[in-house]
Image: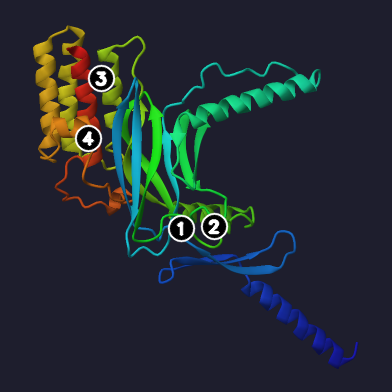
Amino acid sequence: MPLKLFLRRTILLLTMTLSVAHAQDSAIFDSQKNSWNLQYQDPETSQWVRKTYVQQNAILPSLRSTIQSQQNQLLYRFRISNRADAKQLVDTFRIWGITSMYKIPDLPLVTASAKLNPELEDKQQWDQLNAKRRFEKSVVFAPKGWSAGLRVDEQAGQTSFVWSPGLKDSDPDGIPPGKAQDGFMVLRSELPGVARAKLTGSTDEPWGLDNLPDTPFWKQKIAEIQDRDYVLVPVLAPVIPIPTPYSAVELTRRLQVHVQTWLKYGHVQADVLARLNRQFDVLIPALETHNKRAVRAAVEALRKECSDHHADLRDEFVKVGEDNQDALPMLRNASQRAPTSTVGIDRVAARALIFNLQYVSARLD
């Protein structure tokens, strides 16, 4: 081989080797632009791709939740505001991870075999789908220009309510900075507890993570990116089922179990939770023995724990489910929370607890 040709091929080989060595999967966060610079090798073409993914969390939402009695059910209403200095529209609103499954009454069953009787099986599937849609429309409602949905994860035993802008050209793109939107509603019989509203902002390419390689590196990075991709706000939601037949003892047990979840999400401080539990441990035996005096004393102590932190939450004020203050976004993990915080129980949790204690007291009388 001529020396000139040998040197040319050697240089080419070295160049290719160096380019492969320098090209590698990477995900670098740009805090100034709140975006990720992604580089990866396309699984189909093997070409190296560079793209930018903008986080969907440049929103500054607050949320007001109210409750109204409507016959034998409760109408939960939600109003979302997006602060004027936000950089994105709020385009998705979810109340997620509710540990209650809303069973559809008289749901048609699919009994036919797709192999033996495909036409009947297809009809039964269609009947079941229509029944689910009718049920969904009787539970969750959206303002004009928005769509509403009910998502049930039977395997996890969880339910979520989801709202997003409609698909018509005349529908809004979301809630712009400096604007507010009400008309988000849920109609259920369950009593209120504290859930978390998951809100996201609009970006040009929110699906930009869909085509990344299926590798351990990208699975970890996608999880990291998605964990930043939303804002959480505490919200009142129908999470505590009323026992049938009614039992004040069982209902109060369910309420106490729910209250224990507040510590994990920072809705209550440990010392306040301990005091609440001491009163629950008095209230439940008093209900079991029908000791109304002890019941009222324990209920009053629980209410006082709430009003000590939120003096304006009088019984009459909470009874109608209204509030003049919006809930603000939560800090995302325990390490971010100020250990010297003076609020022992957050306002949404206090409202839920007082509302439910009023219900127990009213049924007692």
Pointer 1 with pointer 3, Cβ within 8 A? no
Marks 4 and 2 sit apart, C-alpha to C-alpha, by 35 Å
Q: Secondary structure at mark 4?
A: helix
Quadrant of res 290: top left
Graded by Cα atoms within 10 Å as few (under 14), some (14 to 19) or many (20 or more), the crowding at tag 4 reads: many
Q: Secondary structure at mark 1?
A: loop
Residue identifier under label 4: 351
- Residue drawn at point x = 12 percent, y = 11 percent: 292
Q: Secondary structure at mark 2?
A: loop
Marked residue nearer the N-terminal end (1 or 4): 1
Graded by Cα atoms within 10 Å as few (under 14), some (14 to 19) or many (20 or more), the crowding at tag 1 reads: many
Looking at the image, the residue that sits furthest to the bottom is: 4
- Residue drawn at point x = 44 percent, y = 53 percent: 200
Marked residue nearer the N-terminal end (3 or 2): 2
> In x, y percent, where is residue 116?
81, 18
Residue identifier under label 1: 56
Query: Does 267 sit above or below residue 175?
Result: above
- Residue 46 in view here: yes
